[in-house]
Image (cartoon, rainbow, N blue to C red):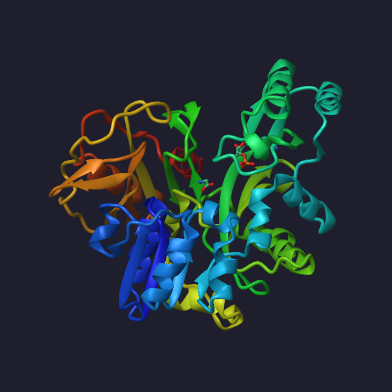
Amino acid sequence: MKILVVGGGGREHAIVWKLAQSPLATEIYCAPGNAGIAQLADCVNIAAEDIDSLLDFALAENIELTVVGPEAPLALGIVDKFTAAGLKIFGPSQAAALIEGSKELAKQIMTKYGIPTAKYRSFADKEAALAYVREQGAPIVVKADGLAAGKGVVVAETLPQAEQAVEDMLSGNAFGAAGAKVVIEEYLTGEEVSVLAFTDGYTVLPMVSAQDHKRAFDGDKGPNTGGMGAYSPAPVYTPEMAETVLRDVLQPAVDGLRAEGRLYKGVLYAGLMVTPDGVKVLEFNARFGDPETQAVLARLQSDLVEIMLAVVEGRLAEKTLAWYDDAAVCVVIASGGYPGHYAKGQEITGLDDDMPDTYVFHAGTAYAGPKIVANGGRVLGVTARGADIRQAIERAYARADKISYAGCFCRRDIGHRALERIEK
Ligand code: AMP
Ligand code: GLY
C-alpha cells in the first residue's frame, strides 16, 4: 500500500517510523518531510497547507492512504477534498476539526454534552469582556477563539494582565480573525495530562497517557514553547481516571460531534487538567500532539496502518490496541534562542551513534549536501523506551548527549513529575 504522510515535524517522523513497520506499507511518501523522515520515506517538496498540490500528487501516484499530521491542512478542509476525490485519508473533516479551530465551539459542545471543563463565557464585544474579567477577578484565562499557532492562550495572574489580553485580542489585530472572539474561562489548578484517542466517529480507542513540557527551561521556567519533551505514561493519570475520561469525556465528545453533524474520524486529543475536583478538559485538538506522539507511538505494539484504515473505513469496533509496558521519554533538542530568534544551518553531529531502544525523531532538520543541519527551533526529539520511566530517561539523555550542534540546548528534567510521583 502506498501511503502519504502530510507534515514535516517530529510528530510526522514518529508516524512515518511506526507506519514503516507495517507489512502493509510498501511505499511511504511525506510532504514536505525532513532529513530524518527522508531515511524512511520519499520526501515530496509540497507544503502541508498546499492542498491542491497534495491532491494532485496523491491522485497521480495512486496513494491509497493519506495521513494528516498538523492542524492547518485539517482546518483548510484537506479531508473533505481528498474524500470527495475518492481517496482514503486519516483525519477529521473541516467541520469536525473545528473542535480545535474554535474554542467557543469546543466549549459549547462540552457544555451541551455534560463534559467537565472550566466554567466560561465568550465575547466578541471588548467592553463586555472587560466587565466580565473585572467581575470575575484574577487569576483568569483569556483565549482567542480561533487557531493561533499555540499563542492564543493567556493565563493571567493579575487583573491588568487579563485586561491587556482582552485588549490585545479584541481590539488589536494581533490574532487576525482568530481573535475576533474570546473565551474567558475559570483558572484551573492541577497537573496536566494529554490523552489521545483513535476514533471512527463511533468507537473510541484511547491511547496511553502522556505529559508534555511546554516551558523552555528546567523547572518549568521561561517562555512557552511548542513542547520541550514528553513522557508516557503519566503516573498522575490512574486507570480509574482513564475509565472516567473515556465515559465522561472522549465518548460523549465523539457522540456529541456526530449528533451535531460533525462526524469525527482520526485522532482526538484531549488536554486534561487533573484538578482537586476531578479531571477537566482544557482543550481538544484535532490531531496527534507534538511531542506526545513521539513518546506514545514508541509504546504502540499494534500495526498503525491497520488501525488507521479501520478508522477511515468506520470499522474501529473490530480493533483493540496493544502497548508495550515500557515507559517512553522524548527529549527535545532545540536551537539557542528558541522560542525566540535562532540560527539555522549548523551541522549536527552524533546522529549515527545508534543505541538500542532509542530513536532520534527529526523535527527541524534538512540536508545540506551530505550533511544534516538544523533547520528550525525544535530540531530533534530523542526518544527512548525503558523498563520504567527512570530507565527511559537515562537512555534518552545518554543518546541525546552524543548529539551536538552550535548553540543547541535541551531541558535536563524531562519526566521530573513522574519521578517525583514514583519517589513519593
Ligand atoms: P490550551 O491551548 O487551551 O490547552 O491552553 C494552553 C495552556 O494554557 C494549557 O496547556 C494550560 O497550561 C493553560 N491553560 C489553559 N486553560 C487553562 C485553565 N482554564 N486554567 C489554567 N490553565 C489553563
Ligand atoms: N503538545 C501540545 C500539542 O500538540 O498541542
In percent of width and height, residue 151 lies at: 57, 34
In percent of width and height, residue 296 lies at: 45, 58
Residue at 49% from the left image edge and 60% from the top image edge: 51
Between 375 and 209, the residue placed more toward the observer is: 375
- The reply to whether residue 405 is visible in this rendering is yes
- The reply to whether residue 286 is visible in this rendering is no
The quarter holding residue 302 reads bottom left
Q: Decide: is 121 above or below 46.
A: above
Q: Horizontal placement of 75 versus 391: left or right? A: right
The quarter holding residue 216 reads top left
Q: Decide: is 216 above or below 368.
A: above
The quarter holding residue 325 reads bottom left
Between 20 and 43, the residue placed more toward the observer is: 43
Residue at 37% from the left image edge and 70% from the top image edge: 19
In percent of width and height, residue 209 lies at: 53, 55
Quarter of the render that holds ligand 1: top right
Residue at 59% from the left image edge and 82% from the top image edge: 315
In percent of width and height, residue 403 lies at: 21, 41
Which quarter of the image is occupied by the N terminus? bottom left
Residue at 25% from the left image edge and 47% from the top image edge: 366
